[in-house]
Image (spheres, rainbow, N blue to C red):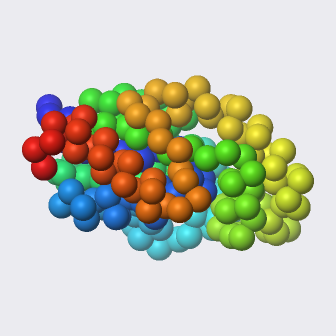
Amino acid sequence: MQKSNIYFIGFMGTGKSTVGPIVANSIDYNFFDLDKEIEKRTNLCIVSIFEQYGEKYFRELEHEILKELIKENKKLVLSLGGGTVKNLTNVELLKTTGIIINLYADIDTLVERLSRKKTRPLLLDENGELLHKEILKEKIRNMLSEREKYYQLADYHIKSEEKLAATVDKIVRIIEEKIFNGKN
């Protein structure tokens, strides 16, 4: 099977969902955001899925929809949720069907980006409120520590710059040089 797909992994807030469609457009690929596809196919937001069914159910659903998207699409750019790669079966599927690009950012950038949204169920308190910045920072640090070994399985690692245009430029250059050998 040809490794034609591009997968963006990394912690939440690194810009995967922002960068993905721009990159897909620039190389004439189809773009999907795995979390958005889960919401579309279940008619539930991610927070509701976590609240109603729990993380274990969400991860099973995530795996099934990931397999479907890969089977249904060619020339695919897919932005994955921050925890998708915790399932090594998912990692194997990604590695055999595409190139994995890990977007990363320093912890202060992540705290700043993530402190603006209440759409991340793992960063909310028991009342559904966003964690206070210091608690948020510690939670992010702990989650990154747990997930880093999975993110290291990527083929490429690119720092998500404050100006995402610079990040997109780097990614497109890597894709053209390393993946398409300059033949896009």
Q: Nearer the viewer, residue 19 or 97?
A: 19
At 65% from the left and 67% from the top, the residue drawn is 119
Q: Nearer the viewer, residue 78 or 127?
A: 78
> On the rendered image, what quadrant is the N terminus found in?
top left
At 27% from the left and 43% from the top, the residue drawn is 175
At 53% from the left and 71% from the top, the residue drawn is 44
Quarter of image, res 100: top left
At 80% from the left and 65% from the top, the residue drawn is 130
In this rendering, position of residue 164 left or right of residue 118 = left
Place of residue 55 in the rendered image (x, y in percent of width and height, measured from the top left): 63, 49
Up-down: is 103 above or below 35? above
In this rendering, position of residue 12 left or right of residue 91 = right
Place of residue 87 in the rendered image (x, y in percent of width and height, measured from the top left): 50, 33
Place of residue 10 in the rendered image (x, y in percent of width and height, measured from the top left): 53, 44
Up-down: is 74 above or below 98? below
Quarter of image, res 148: top right
In this rendering, position of residue 24 left or right of residue 57 = left
Up-down: is 119 above or below 60? below
In this orientation, does residue 69 appear?
Answer: no
In this orientation, does residue 154 appear?
Answer: yes
Q: Nearer the viewer, residue 156 or 71?
A: 156
Give the farthest residue toward the bottom.
43
Place of residue 73 in the rendered image (x, y in percent of width and height, measured from the top left): 20, 54
In this rendering, position of residue 91 left or right of residue 69 = right
Quarter of image, res 4: top left
Total marks shown come to 0
